[in-house]
Image (cartoon, helix red, strand yellow):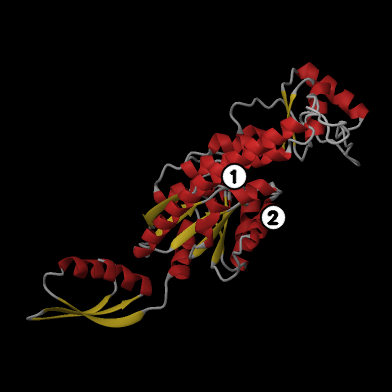
Amino acid sequence: MARALPQLDVLGNTHVRLPKAQPGTLFGKGKIEELKGIFKAAEVELVVIDGPVSPVQQRNLEKEWNVKILDRTGLILEIFSDRARTREGVLQVEMAALSYQKTRLVRAWTHLERQRGGLGFVGGPGETQIESDRRALDEAIIRIRRQLEKTVKTRELHRAARKKVPYPVVALVGYTNAGKSTFFNHLTGAKVFAKDMLFATLDPTMRAVNLPNGLDVILSDTVGFISDLPTELVAAFRATLEDALSADLILHVRDIAHPETESQAGNVRTILSSLGIGHETPQIEIWNKTDLLNEEDAGRVAALAERKEDVFGVSSITGDGMEALLAAIKAKLDDERSTDILSLPFSAGQKRAWLFQEDVVQVEDQDENGFKLTVSWTQRQKERFDAL
């Protein structure tokens, strides 16, 4: 995960068996000494621990090893801060960071003496500083929450505007680095930041697009999911998944070449369920990155996908499998059709042309008043016609 930050030069990693976490130092004395020697020899300046580290443990380890410590939440926040581009994304990162800092104030100021009153039996070192910092953080969080409320209202207005042009919304979801942005770019021709790294997309990107099979949709690329996402981040980044909540179709993009693809898919399903997205929303599972599989694995994956409903193996790089997937997307979004007879004056040439462009005209007659057309169309097409 640390490689997702370009400014970090990762020198190595190690797994440490931890039968019991030490409350003050996380690791035992022997392991601390062993790691200290490794870090000193490699001239390490930053150590990332893939798990929670308390403020006390962080301070003691930094003192023992003479390095900066980042735990899992701190690293994710750094990545989010580096990636966020939109106003909403930046505000969400700031609020998550402040919430994280607030949890780390306890005992963080034991080097300060409290201004004692009375006999001094109540309270402890640094209490005044902790209270002051907590108040400042609370005020900053409230300020950012108000700013976020304004951006959420703006997004609601944009969503309402999209409903007036009733294209179906298709949301891409998936574990981070599953290839969603590359898939998005392949379908739309957009230049969304796509790179083989974690959290390449942190801001929802939306694009009205005419798919190669003629279907008009609004495609939404969402933030990548990750296992054990810290609580403050789940709350702060929920808004980036709002488009998935209101989507007509969800495309779950998986990195089928990843050794932990099943575990990652399980995490995505769990998060979708926690957001209230159930089986009532149509879903298609996309097994992406088939181009990274060897011939034997590619054949096995293709055979398995064929036996499953709404599962398609594709490559966003080569385009393999896209045609069948697009047909399935169109079938999922094609509403039931109704037949209507329309009367259009000769002056309504634009509306008539649109009907033919949508390929909904079955019969056309003409009299002195204009055109009479028999059309077979979906409810969405009818609403779009009325909005012309």
Which residue occupies the foreground of this view, 135 or 338?
135
How far apart marks 2 and 1 lie (CA) works out to 14 Å
Q: Residue at x 65, y 52 (%)?
A: 297
Q: Residue at x 66, y 42 (%)?
A: 99
Q: Residue at x 15, y 67 (%)?
A: 349
Residue 330, by quadrant, is bottom left
Amino acid type assigned to the residue bearing label 2 in the image: Glu
Residue 371 spot, x, y in % from top left: 15, 78
* Residue linked to disc 2: 262
Quadrant of the image for the C terminus?
A: bottom left
* Residue linked to disc 1: 177
Is residue 258 visible in the rendered image? The answer is no
Q: Residue at x 89, y 23 (%)?
A: 33
Left or right: residue 337 versus residue 106 is: left
Residue 344, by quadrant, is bottom left
Residue 365 spot, x, y in % from top left: 16, 81
Residue 372, by quadrant, is bottom left
Quadrant of the image for the N terminus?
A: top right
* Of the image marks 2 and 1, the number of the one nearer the N terminus: 1
